[in-house]
Amino acid sequence: MSVSSTTGETSGGSWLYDPKVRSIFAQVVVVGSVVALFYFIIHNTAVNLEKRGIASGFDFLWEPARYDVTGGFLNVRSTQTHWDAFMAGLLNTFIVAVFGCLAATFLGVVMGVLRLSKNWLVSKLAAVYVETLRNVPVLLQILFWYGVFILMPKPKQSLALFDMFYFNNRQFLGPKVFFGDTPALSAAEQEAMIHRMGEVKYNKLVEASGGVENVPAALAESVKPVFGTGSWILPVSLIIAIVGVVLFRRWAKKRQENSGEQLPVFWISAGTIVLFPILCVLLSGTAVNVQYPELIGFNFVGGASIPVAFMALWFALSTYTATFVAEIVRAGILAVNYGQTEASFALGLRSGQAMRLNILPQALRVIVPPLTSQYLNLTKNSSLALVVGYPDVVGTIGGITLNQTGQAVECIVITMAVYLFFSLVISMFMNWYNKRIALVER
Amino acid sequence: MAKSTRKTTTSRSSATTRSQAAAKKAAPKAKASNGGSAATVPAAGMAVTDEVAIQVSSMNKWYGDFHVLRDINLTVNRGERIVVCGPSGSGKSTLIRCMNRLEEHQEGQIIVDGIELTNDLKKIDEVRREVGMVFQHFNLFPHLTILENCTLAPIWVRKMPKREAEEVAMEFLTKVKIPEQAGKFPGQLSGGQQQRVAIARSLCMNPRIMLFDEPTSALDPEMIKEVLDVMVDLAESGMTMICVTHEMGFARKVANRVIFMDEGQIIEQNEPGEFFDNPRSDRTKLFLSQILH
Amino acid sequence: MSDTLRPEDQLGGGLPERAPPPSTVGIQGWMRENLFSGPINSIGTIVAIGIIVWLLPGILEWAIFDATFVGVDANGDGSITRKDCLVENAAGLMTLEGACWVLVYVRWEQLIYGFYGSDGSIWRPTIAFVGLLLAIAPLLFDKVPFRRALLWFAFAFPFIAVWLLGGGEWKLSSVLVFYGLIVAILPLLFDKMPGREILLWVTKIYPLFIAFLLFDAILDTLLGFSIWNTLLGPLAVWEFSPLPALAEVSTHKWGGLMLTIVIGMVGIVLSLPIGVVLALGRRSTMPAVRLLCVIFIEFVRGVPLITLLFMASNMLPLFFPEGIELDKLVRALVVVVAFSAAYMAEVVRGGLQAIPKGQYEAADAMALTYWKSMYLIILPQALKIVIPGIVNSFIGLFKDTTLVLIIGLFDILGMAKAAVTHANWIGLAREAYVFVGVVYFIFCFSMSRYSIWLEEKLNTGHKR
Ligand SMILES: Nc1ncnc2c1ncn2[C@@H]1O[C@H](COP(=O)(O)OP(=O)(O)OP(=O)(O)O)[C@@H](O)[C@H]1O
Ligand SMILES: [Mg+2]
């Protein structure tokens, strides 16, 4: 639109050639067109909604959803509201995004480093992995893995590993650890469970657990805190360990400054953070119950269960995104001049030290910005959960709620707002990071 | 620090070769000749001892099929200052990079400070601790301040307390005349200043031998002098130095020997006066006529 | 001669070049260097070989040796289904041993053409595809026989393809809008062509004509009065075929690989110019234009494509007055183009930022208008810098075309998904998706190789 107005060569008064006048004129035209377009859209939407008898607004969020949200990490019953369904979707999106980013980073860094390996075979294998997966659409990969996972045996014939882990075409199961004393089921909860799984199965479950009082409350819902009374020891000891590690690091630094001696700070810190809470739990005599998945009837009860849809989605997203991470890591390391490595070697640094002290800090500046945008991509791609029925934001509020209520505009606005929020947070982080490294540079 | 010095001294005595014996015989005469020729005489502190610092014997190196260093024999005594020159691609850099194992050789022997360079990582570490190197393009660490550049290796390799490392670093930064830049980042310094930092950084490791690979050839003319001044000071303090450079004034002033290389071979070596005024091989003459106009 | 010289260190030189020791060259040397240069390296080699030995035989067996390729009615039940791939295993049960490629064999036509074949006119997309290859060749490579002629063809190809694939009869206004574009663009592309002066007039009038039609359409929907219809009367509703008449094939019959290529190509052809305009807008000195471009780009890049597609399928109908029904394919195309244009804009902006300020100043100094300086000086350089980024965007776009299956279009993946949910092919997800994956891989991998090749070519050209 601005094209024709700024290049218009028709002659006129000299003011026509005043760049200021032209610029203002062009802007008025552009803004005017956009406003007109929006007016047109809003007007039509209002008319259309009125004809269909749909009241706009967000009140529908507090109405009963009339659909179950299952197959994710938080089940919502049809009597709960759309808002509850949305929250469950949000949680599911968040979980798949976080775990996807973690796995993609780990796999991507490994692959990126392997691609730089001096070993020809190893680097070629890594290259094959990267080139194959990155050139195939992620949606296809999600469907593929889902197709593979649902070809696994039915729950009754689950593949078992050490009688602890089970894989079947519905979920992946493992033992679940409960800290503290888990209260027995309340009468209401017992009723709910009997209602849900039928009397026969329920009785079997009670038998398997050795009495009603032993059926953990956590079974009443697929996700309930695994922390019972007395489990406060776990977070408290974790906090103590972290504080201790921070103090220890300070002390180690001081010690180095004064005496030059160095400790394996990383291993000591990691060990403390992992071992100290475990030790505290064991010594304080806090109850630790491990609950194994139990096949009752045609399905498993108890244990930690991960739905197949999530596995397919998570697996596909992380292996796909890892290929991009691998390329970013590789480019980042290559971007650091080889002279830096040589100078480190010439000073007597070992190759591990050279990597940690000189190469990585420089490579990270190149790596972090594109890496964050890959995290964002993964989060956005997690919306493809829809095709495998994993109830994420798009599947709940943007899908079933939209179809049931007809509140298309509101539902899509909410869905988009969620992702825009993630984008905003990530780009804020990126600006902050870029500023920080810019400060260090000059 | 003291510990490692002692260690190298003991291992040095075990290394005996034929040419080392030859070197011992030659050394007294060398001292006499130094005293004789006044024009090129290095200062009194720049004494060459009869201790062998670097011994290269029958060394060959290939890049793939390309024979880049051919049968190199070279003995460098402690306190000696050697300038290596030759046309581009003649293998000068490769030669000195072999001396701290930045490059691997395929045949022959390189013994530095009594330690033979092989695949043994421990020995490589030991050698690199005693041998400093200055590169054409400085290769300072851009993410660290000048002071951190200088203290990094002492802290992590020599396990020196940070305070002490910083004191040592400031001392050397003062020696190269830029103590006031300690808090800055390499990107904020001029090329000449950066190269002086690079020299200081190497010196902080307290090396017994210094290698220079064309330290001034990436610099503007007005900066060359400030770097050469530092190198002259260093030479006067008695450091064993091997310098790849085409700065002939510098060679005349401080070198004990000038080595001319071509096609991966040492063509000619002589003390600087003789080398420049009276080159013997045709290739040396041609090369000198080109660089001296 | 000085005394510092040692007897063995005197005049040297003249040594012949020798071959390296045998253990460092040849296969042995290569293996030592690349596979076994140290303990860690050797472990790596062994692990890698282990992985290959573990995976490869199984994959080959499944995909080739145990697989069924051709659909013969092996069990004689009158139809070819997955049952014809079953073999009896040790326990006497009928199972699938290897891949059942029969699915691809039987569903080939649908995977490639969608439901286009139900009209018996598969020759049309086939010819269009050959035409596409002919049209693309001169754009990709310098040394193609008859390159000039093919370039002309490439230019006309989109218009030919629409006619070939869509067929049917058009209203006068559509013909003018669509085919007028050729006439309008021609004189911009070719400097020395006969009748350029006259065509340039068309170029100038064309945007005005489009603006008029848009205005007219809005007028029509709001007031029910159309200048165009009133002026032309019966001519306005008269429908005819601009090129030799072909039967109309409605877009809901398009599908399979053909649909994938259509969406991919339209996206590629349109997203670059729109992306360039957006990028220029984002760097404009006019705050209002800049703001609008920033909002559009950041909004589109901030949300998943799937939500935009939902918007197109659920919200777009609300935006238009009742009775106007936008083709599903057109809706998807609009979204795909807008989506990739936003990403393209960021890629192009990177190129624009990399151009030194002096170039902009030089262009200004030559008193070029804004558009001329961009077109002649800045953009050619900026685009050249970001060719890898542009091709990456294209690859991303091509992969993203799969998402249209979510709004009910049947691209090649949609067709495969439909096939594996059919009772005849239950449990053959792997086969179907591997096939589609291979197709996508071929397209995307060749695009990325082409970009690398082009980059190298341009680089060396730069150095000389
Ligand atoms: N990593 C390598 N791989 C293969 N060939 C190499 C490598 N490094 C150097 N060469 C080759 O070895 C020869 C010697 O290189 P070197 O860098 O030692 O020369 P130089 O004498 O230092 O030259 P200049 O004065 O240009 O620095 C050159 O022909 C060079 O092309
Ligand atoms: Mg060199």
Image (cartoon, coloured by chain):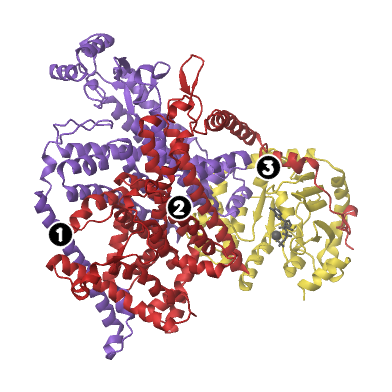
Chain for disc number 1 = A
Q: Quadrant of residue B36?
A: bottom right
- What whole-number distance in Å separates the C-alpha atoms at marks 1 and 3? 78 Å
For the question of whether residue C413 can be seen, the reply is yes
Q: Which mark is residue B124?
A: 3
* Residue count near mark 2 (Cα–Cα under 10 Å), binned few <14, some 14–19, many ≥20: few
Is residue A383 placed above or below C312 in the rendered structure?
A: above
SS label for mark 1: helix
Chain drawn in yellow: B
Chain drawn in red: C
Chain drawn in purple: A
- What whole-number distance in Å separates the C-alpha atoms at marks 2 and 1? 42 Å
* Residue count near mark 3 (Cα–Cα under 10 Å), binned few <14, some 14–19, many ≥20: many
The mark lying in front, picked from 2 and 3, is 2
The mark lying in front, picked from 1 and 3, is 1
Closest to the observer, A272 or A430 = A430
* Residue count near mark 1 (Cα–Cα under 10 Å), binned few <14, some 14–19, many ≥20: many
To which residue does mark 2 refer? C123
